[in-house]
Image (tube, helix red, strand yellow):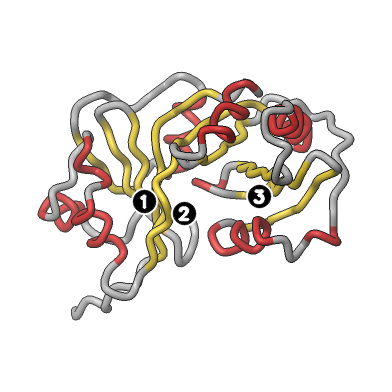
Amino acid sequence: MVRGLGDIVRAAADGWFPPGDGCVEVVPPYLPGVEAMVSFTAHAVAATALPLDALLDAGADGLAGATSGRVMETMAGPYGELDVLDVLLVNRGTGRSTLPERADLADHPRARYARGWRTDVHVHGDERGVVTMSRGLGGLAEVSFEVPDGARGEGRGRSLLRDALGLVVAGDPVLAAVAPGNAASLRAALAAGFVPLGSVQLVRPGRPRRRV
C-alpha cells in the first residue's frame, strides 16, 4: 500500500518519524492544485506529481537541499506560486470549545488565504482574535490564528489556540504552520502545547504539461 502524506504526518505526530537517512521520497499530491515539501530530521517528503528524478536532478535531499531555491522552483514551474517556508507543529484536539463560529468574518484576509491552500475552512473568533480551522496538510485538521494589533504579549494568542483545539475531536492531531520569523505566533503556539515536527512549504504548481 502506498503511503500518503497524511499517513506520514499522522505517524510523526504519534512519534513515528521517517528514517533519518538523508533521503527524499515522493508521494501523491493530497489536494488538487496544491503540492508540498515537508522536511523532517534528515528526511524529506514531497507530495508532488513530479518524478523523484526531477527533484534529485534539482539537488533535493533529506537535508537542507529539500527546500533549496532550485528544488522549489522545479516544483512550482515557470507559472506556479510558492508559499512561505513554515515551521510545522502539531497538538491534539480536546473536543470541547465554546469558541463561536463567525460567519461575519468569512471574508477576513486570513480566511481568504486559508481557502486558497486548504479545504473545509471555518472561521471562529471572539474579542481575542480570529481562528481558521480547516482541512490542511495531508487532509489533517489545521489551525491558524491572528490577534489584533497591539494585543501581543497578553497571552491572547495562547488562550485562543487552546480554545481552538476544542473544535477538533479529542485526540485527533491538529497542525499549525507558522513562519519562523513570526516569533510572537511561534511562541504562542509553543506555549499552547504545540510541538515541532519539521518544516513545510506549499506550492501551487504551474508547470508545462509533459509530452507523452
Rendered location of residue 51, percent (x, y) = 22, 57
Quarter the C terminus occupies: bottom left
Sequence-earlier tag: 1 or 2: 2
- Describe the element under mark 3 as helix, strand or loop: strand
**Disc 1 versus disc 2: distance between alpha carbons?**
7 Å
Apparent side of residue 120 relative to residue 197 in the rendered image (left or right): right
Task: Tell me the crowding category of disc 2: few under 14, some 14 to 19, or many 20 or more residues within 10 angstroms, Cα based.
Answer: some
Q: Is residue 56 above or below residue 196?
A: below
The residue pinned by badge 3 equals 134
Based on the displayed image, in which of its 4 quarters is residue 148 positioned?
top right
Residue at the image position 70 percent from the left and 33 percent from the top: 157
Seen at 76% across and 52% down, the residue is: 123
- For residue 30, the mark is 2
User: N-terminal of the two: label 3 or label 2?
Assistant: 2
Task: Please rate how many residues cluster around mark 3, counting C-alpha atoms within 10 Å: few if below 14, some from 14 to 19, many from 20.
Answer: many
Q: Residue at x 44, y 37 (%)?
A: 180
201, above or below 51, in the image = above
The residue depicted at 85 percent of the width and 42 percent of the height is 127
Nearer the viewer's eye, disc 1 or disc 3? 3
Q: Which mark is residue 139?
A: none
User: SS at mark 1?
Assistant: strand
- The x and y percentages for residue 110 are 65, 56
Residue bearing mark 1:
47
Q: Give how far across and how far down residue 111 sits, in percent.
A: 68, 58
Q: CA distance from mark 1 to mark 3?
A: 19 Å
Secondary element at image label 2? loop
**Amino acid type, residue under disc 3 in the picture:** Ser
Instruction: Name which residue type carries label 1.
Output: Ala
